[in-house]
Image (cartoon, coloured by chain):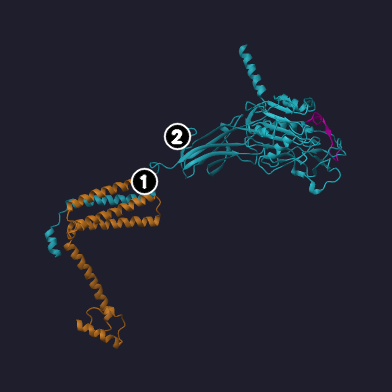
Chain colours: A cyan, B orange
Amino acid sequence: MKSFLSFSLLLLATLVSAISSTGDRLLAVLDDVAEKATYSKFLGDLESRGFKITYETPKSESLSLFRLGERKYDHVIFFPTKAKGLGPNLTPNLLVQFLNQKGNILLTLSSEVPAATSLVSLLTELDITLPSDRTGLVVDHFNHDVLSAADAHDVLLLPVPRPARPDVADLFASGAPADTPIAFPRGAGVLLGAGPLLTPIVRAPATAYLYNPKEQAEVLAADELFGAGAQLALVAGMQARNSARLAVVGSAEMLSDKWFDAKVTKVGEKKEVPTYNREVAKRVAGWAFQETGVLKVNWVEHRLNEAGPGANVSNPAMYRIKNDVTYKISLSQWDWDKWTGFTVPANDDLQLEFSMLSPFHRLHLAVDAAHSSPEATAYTASFKLPDQHGIFNFKVNYKRPFLTNIEEKNTVSVRHMAHDEWPRSYVISGAWPWIAGIGATITAWLAFVAVWMFSKPADARVVLKKTQ
Amino acid sequence: MAPKRHNARDITPSAAATTQAGPTTAGTVPATAAVTKPYRVSVTTKDSWAQVVGNVWSHYLKTTPQRTKLIDVFMAFLIVVGALQFLYCVLAGNYPFNAFLSGFSATVGQFVLTASLRMQTTEANKSDFPSVSPERAFADYVVCSLILHFFCVNFIN
C-alpha cells in the first residue's frame, strides 16, 4: 500500500512536471485581474498544461520578478495595460536581466492601448521597433474578415504560418488544416532588425499596412508609412543566445475567448470557417515558454577508432595526428510533455567541426541508430585527424531559428608522432636500396679491416729508397 | 730535334701546305712529311698517353705499399656504392629521406674516414703527423667508423 502510494505520488509528480522543460511558474501582468476572464480559454489551456499562473497588476506592491537574486517566475506574459509605465518593478533593465537569467517573456500589443514605455524600451533593446506613438493599426483591404470588419478591414485573416525556409523546423503549422485562417483582430505590427536572433512567426500579407487611426485617419502619406506588407511582423520571436525566448503577439485580442470560437469569412467567399487561433496561441505560448523546440545534449563521446591500447577509452584528453576517431552526440527534443529523439529537419544538416581557430574538418553527422532510443537520437561521424598537432575542439554548433542553441565544445590535445611510432625503414620498400648501401659499406669495411690486419706492413726503408 | 722543329715552324706558314693547327705539330715530326702529318701525330699522341698512364700505373704499383693499395681499392668501392645510391635517389625520389641521408652519409663518411687513414699512414706524410703511429691511426679509424655505423643504422630506423 505504501509503495503504491509513493508510486502514485511519483506519477503525480511526473504529470505535474510534464509541462515546460524549464519551469512552471508563470506571471501574468494585466491591467486589472478581472480582465483574465477575457482570456479564460487561453489561460485555462496554460493551466491545464501545468503552469501555475500568478496574476498581478503593474501597480501591485508585491510584484517582483526576482527574490534574493533568483528568478521568482520562469515565464512572464504581458497583456496590454493602460498605464504609460509599468512601475519600478518592471523596468526594461529588470526585464533584460530576467531574460539574461533564462526567463521567458510573452508580450502582447494592441491597437487600442499604446504599449508601456518599459516594454517599448525592452523591444528597442532587442532591435524590435514599434511605431513612434507606441501603437498602430494593421489593416488589409484584401484579406480581412467580411463578417466582423466589413467596413473597418482591421480583422485580418492570415494563413497558418509555414516555415519561411524548407530547412527551418515547422513548429507552428505542422498538422494544421489547409484552409483554416488565423484571425488577427485590431492589432499592431512590429519591424524586426537584421539580427540573427529575431525571427518573424507570422508576417503581414503583402497588401497589409500599419497606420495610426487617430493621426492618419484622413490621409496617409507614403513617406509617413511605418511599415507595409511582409516587412511587418504580426507575431515575432526572439531567442537570446542563452536560449531565453521572447515572443511578441501583435494583437492581444487574438488570444481572447471571442476569437478562439469565432467564425470568419474571407473576402470573396461565403463559407464561414472556424479560426485556428486557439491552436496558434497554444503553439506560440508553448514555444515562448520552452515547451517546443527545446533541444538537449544528453551525452557526447569521442574515442579512438582503431585497434591498440586506448581503443576502449571514452573521451580521452589526447590523440595523435592522423588517428582515426569517432565522435557521437546524443540529442533530445522536448515535445510538450516528454523528451523525444531530435530529428534534423529535412534539407538541414547537423555538422561536426574539428577546429583549431578555424575548422580543419566540417563533417556531416549521420544518425546512429544503434545508440538511439525513442527519447534520444545519436549522431555520429568518423574521420582521420589532420596532420597537425595542437589543441583542437570537437565542436557542434547548431543554431537554428526556433530551436535551442546548441554549442557543444570538447577540447582535446593532438600530439605529434612519437619517435618510435614511425614505420620502420624496412617496412618501406623505397628505403631498401639505401639499407643495402649501408650494408655494403659496413660489410666492405669489415672485410677491409680484416685484410688490413693480416696484411704485411710495408718495409719502410724499401719504400723510402724507391721514392728517392 | 730542336732545330728541326724550329725550321718546321718557320717554314709551314710560308709554304701554306699545312692543313692543321699549330699545337699538334709538337713532337718528333719531320717538316717535309706534310701530308702524312696528322695521322702519324695522333697515333703517336695516343701512344704517348697510354705510355703516360702506363708509367703512372707501373710507378704506382711499384712504389705504393700494399696497405695503401688496399685503402685505394676500398675507397674506389665506396665511390661506386655512393654513386649508385645517389643515382637511385635522383631517379626514384627521396621518399624515406632519412633512409637516403643515412645510407648516403654512411658511404661518404666512410670514404672521408678512409681518406684520413690513408693520409696518416702514408710514409711521405710522416713529418705532418709526428705523434701518430700507423697503429694509432688505424685504431682511431676503427673507433670512428664504428661510431659512424652506429649513427647511420640508428638514423635509418
Image quarter of residue A157: top right
Q: Position of residue A188 (x, y in %)?
A: 78, 38
Chain identity of mark 2: A
The answer to whether the residue labelled 1 contacts the one labelled 2, judged by CB atoms less than 8 Å apart, is: no
Q: Earlier in the sequence, mark 1 or mark 2?
A: 2
Label 1, secondary structure: give it.
helix
Q: Which residues are magenta?
A: A255-269
How packed mark 2 is, by other alpha carbons closer than 10 Å (few <14, some 14-19, many 20 or more), is few
Does residue B4 appear to the left or right of A348 in the view shown?
left
Residue placed most toward the observer, A25 or A344: A25
Amino acid type shown at disc 2: Gly
User: What x and y, as percent, mark residue A183?
Assistant: 80, 35
Nearest-to-viewer mark from 1 and 2: 2
Q: Which residue is mark 2?
A: A310
Residue A370, above or below B76: above
- The crowding category of the residue bearing disc 1, from other C-alpha atoms within 10 Å (few below 14, some 14 to 19, many at least 20), is few
Residue B5: image quadrant is bottom left
Q: For the C terminus of chain B, which image quadrant? A: top left
Subunit of label 1: A
Which residue is the extreme one toward the right?
A151
Percent position (x, y) of residue B38?
28, 79
Residue A213: say if magenta. no
Q: Which mark is residue A147?
A: none
Is residue A138 depicted above or below A16 in this figure?
below
Q: Which mark is residue A426?
A: 1
Q: Residue A237 at what x, y percent from top left? A: 70, 37
Tell me if residue A393 can be seen: yes
* Residue A276 appears in the figure: no
Going by the image, does B107 lie left or right of A31? left
Left/right of residue A169 with respect to residue B140 in the rendered view: right
Decide if residue A410 is on the left or right side of residue A102.
Answer: left
